[in-house]
Structures are given as C-alpha cells and as structure tokens.
Amino acid sequence: MAPTPKGRATYHHGDLAAALVQTTLEIIDEVGVRGFSVAEAARRTCVSPGAPYRHFADRDALLAAAALEVSRRLRAIYLGSVADVGSAQERLAAVAGTFVRAAARYRGGLDILFAPGLRATHPELRDSSREFVDLLLPSAFEVVAPGEAAATAVALLDALHALARGYVAQLLEGKFGDPDDVVEEVAIRATRAARALVAGYGVPSGPVGEEGRDR
Amino acid sequence: MAPTPKGRATYHHGDLAAALVQTTLEIIDEVGVRGFSVAEAARRTCVSPGAPYRHFADRDALLAAAALEVSRRLRAIYLGSVADVGSAQERLAAVAGTFVRAAARYRGGLDILFAPGLRATHPELRDSSREFVDLLLPSAFEVVAPGEAAATAVALLDALHALARGYVAQLLEGKFGDPDDVVEEVAIRATRAARALVAGYGVPSGPVGEEGRDR
DNA sequence: CATTCAATGTATGAGCCTCTCACATCACTC
DNA sequence: GAGTGATGTGAGAGGCTCATACATTGAATG
C-alpha cells in the first residue's frame, strides 16, 4: 500500500516541520486559534493527517512551535526598528507602540504567543519572553533612579509588558473598531501610556506615591 | 423510548441554563478553557449531550454566558471593596490590585472573560466591560488635569485596563511562580504601576513627556 | 377537568478532529 | 547492497459539536 503521495514529487517532504509551522501561522491568521486544526495543516501541506505527529507530540506542541516563530519575528522587529532609538526613556516607550503595530501585522500570531493554556504548559515560550527582557534590561536600568534596587528595573519591564499586552488584546478584539483602521492611534496611545509608566518609575524617591511627583 | 432521566428526580431539570453556566465555571477552573467541552458539562449536570443546545446556540455561547457571570461577580467585588476608597487616585490604582486578586480567585473565569475569540464575536462581553468603564469614569475625570479633553479620561481608563489585564495574564501563566504564592506581591506591583499611570495622566501639560512621537 | 402546546429533554447519527499503530518508503552507512 | 532509522501512509478508535426527530411535562385554555 502507501501509494505515492499526491501533491508532492517525492515521498518524503523535505522539511515538514518548518512547513507545518508556516502553514499553521497562515491558518491562524485566517480562522484564529480556535479554528485551527492539525488535520487542516496536514491537508494544506499535502501530507496525511498523521504525518504532523512525527514532528510534534500533539496539537499544542505545533502551536507552541508556531508561537516561538512569532517570537523570533518580534525580536527581529525590535532589533530592526527600536533598538537604536535615542534616549532610554523613549526607547522603552517605543517598544510598546512597536508591539501594537506588530500585533496588527501578525494578528493570530500574537493570539498564540499569548494563548493562556500554551504559555502555562510550554516553558520555552516564557523563556523567549525572558530573552526579550534581557534585551531591554539595560534601558530599564538607565531609566530607573540611581539609588533604586535592581528589582525596580525588572518591575518596570513587567509593567511595560503588561501594558503592551493589554493594549494588543483590546486592539485585536476590536474594542476600538476595526484593528486595521485604529492601529496607529492605539499604538500612539500605548506609547503615551508607556511614557507615563516610565516616568513613574524614574522618580528618585521610591515608588510613585501621592507624594512622589510634585505639583 | 426516552427513559426516565438518571441522576435526577424529574424529567425537566428546573434551571438547566444556570446549572450549565455554574458547571462550566467549575470545569474551566479545573482543566482550562481548552479542556472544556459541552459534552462534559452535560454529563456533570446529568442531562443528555444534546440538552445544552436547547439553551445555548453553540459551545461559544455557553462560554460567553459563563464569562458574563464572571463579569457580574467582578462588578460585585468592585462595588464591595473598592468603590469607597478615599481619593480618586487611590481608587483607580486599587482597581488594578483588586483585579489581580480576583484573578487568583477565579482563575479560569478570567480566561474566558478575556478569551480572544469570544470577545471578538460576542459583543455583550465588551458591553459588560463598558459598564465597568462607566463606573470608573467619574474617578478618572477627577484625576485628569482640569483643562484636559474628556478623551484623556477615557484613555486613562483604557491604559489601566490594559495594565491590569496584562498583569493578570502574566500571573495566571505562572510567570512569577505559583499564582497562589505570588498573588499578593503581584497585586501590589500592579497597584504601584497603576499609580504611576494615574500620575502620568494627571500632569496638567498634556501627556507625559515631550511631543517626540515614537518612531 | 381535559386538552393542547410550547418548552425542554432524549436518542441517534453525520462529520470532523486528535492521536495511535502497523506498515511503506527512502537516505545513509558500512 | 543490506541494514537501519527517520519520515510518511492508511486505517481506525474514541471523543466532540451540532442537527434532527421524537418523548415528556407544566401551564394555559376552553
């Protein structure tokens, strides 16, 4: 049995794992995470429904691999367009805006990157975020008041991360209207909010209490 | 056919819809949204697999109903423990912390409240958030500089919303360790970050920082 | 009361999906 | 050129969503 595979020249695919990840991203862009199925990915890649399981333990493993790919692309975007922004303050603020714009471009990509279940069960996804933190930490240290504990810089990054993810979520669920239409405005607003956050953590006299800022 | 239903005294359940919502919340607390199935909910409620579809159009509709219930409970928490906090500044900051603490208590509940697909397709979920905004808007107006446009107050609330959701997501995915262990610390950090945000939007001379837009 | 009927539950099944297992095919090594 | 491990195929078990036809019942109506 096992007739020649249809839709391909050779019996073996060549690089099925990579092809599946790519196809997965495409499917998710079209129908969302919930609409995605391993079977559909196999179909579009012209392999049998069981083939993907040679490379990925289960559906979630494939999704996680796709999410990692998204993470790599985000990193590239950061390095290409934010890393060289002048001041540390503006650099950190710009990350938030850039993140929002990337969300509009990758849509479903960010859906899986932040899918609740996936991150909880696949630590490599959290690791990929940590690498991002390492990239930004120097900037955070520059911004935080000199006497502050190192933990404050990390806390600032966590806060920025939270803020950006929250904006992305609101953008993608259509809270502000069609994502394509409002992307730029939301990005600007996210940047503005990030600036406020950065300013708050930069105050010398500890956390921003009611006393922290004058005026 | 149609023998007497097993596990119940009467043929009719009484209030199947409500029971299903409750059961749904329990299941999601145990196995997450992805592990949830309408069939399992029916099983635990001792009705046939088809019965839920008399009350909910499809799986997502049941999830959305459960999410709405979560939203109601959150509202109750707010009214019971935050609404009477002294200053508007502290009130807004406290919302973030309270939200984080509620997340630890309801776990999966917040997963569905913020599930990407659901909010996009079920506007009533977004409406429920909007009601929350109405509750907080007066506080936001108090905080924002007098000359500011009304939009600034709304923008502040969006930023707070984003921030809180981001912290909740990080908490629930275990980024800081076992959620139960770190809840209080994360809540405090969220509150602090929220204070920074509020302070940033309260500065009279427009948004924080210079007019330098991000690149 | 008796009857009707709309609401609610059951039974059945089609179609899809995930994941497994035995077997086929192929690239590579010795 | 035979052996071997990696990769793909086919078949199928078991679960799920949802549609459809039928059963049961409480409540309204006469």
Image (cartoon, coloured by chain):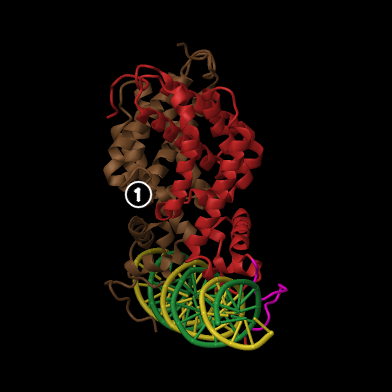
Chain colours: A brown, B red, C yellow, D green
Q: Residue at x 61, y 40 (%)?
A: B77
Please report, as a chain letter, where disc 1 is located: A
- Compared with residue A206, is residue A63 higher up or lower down, i.e. above or below? below
Is the C terminus of chain B in the top left, top right, bottom left or bottom right quadrant? top left
Residue D13 in the figure: left or right of residue D8: right
Residue B184 in the figure: left or right of residue D12: right
- Compared with residue B174, is residue B194 higher up or lower down, i.e. above or below? above
The amino acid marked with disc number 1 is Arg
Q: Residue at x 36, y 39 (%)?
A: A75
Task: Choose between B55 and A131: the one closer to the eye.
Answer: B55
Q: Kindly state the secondary structure of the residue where label 1 is placed.
A: loop
Q: Main secondary structure of the magenta part?
A: loop
Is the N terminus of chain B in the top left, top right, bottom left or bottom right quadrant? bottom right
Task: Choose between A156 and D22: the one closer to the eye.
Answer: D22
Crowding at label 1, few (<14), some or many (≥20) Cα neighbours within 10 Å?
many
Q: Please report the bounds of the magenta region as a residue range.
A: B2-14
Percent coordinates x, y for residue A80 in the rendering? 29, 35
Q: Residue beneath label 1, please?
A: A107
- Compared with residue A7, is residue A214 higher up or lower down, i.e. above or below? above
- Compared with residue B15, is residue B142 higher up or lower down, i.e. above or below? above
Percent coordinates x, y for residue A76 in the rendering? 33, 40
What residue occupies the far top of the structure in this picture?
Answer: A214
Q: Residue at x 41, y 50 (%)?
A: A111
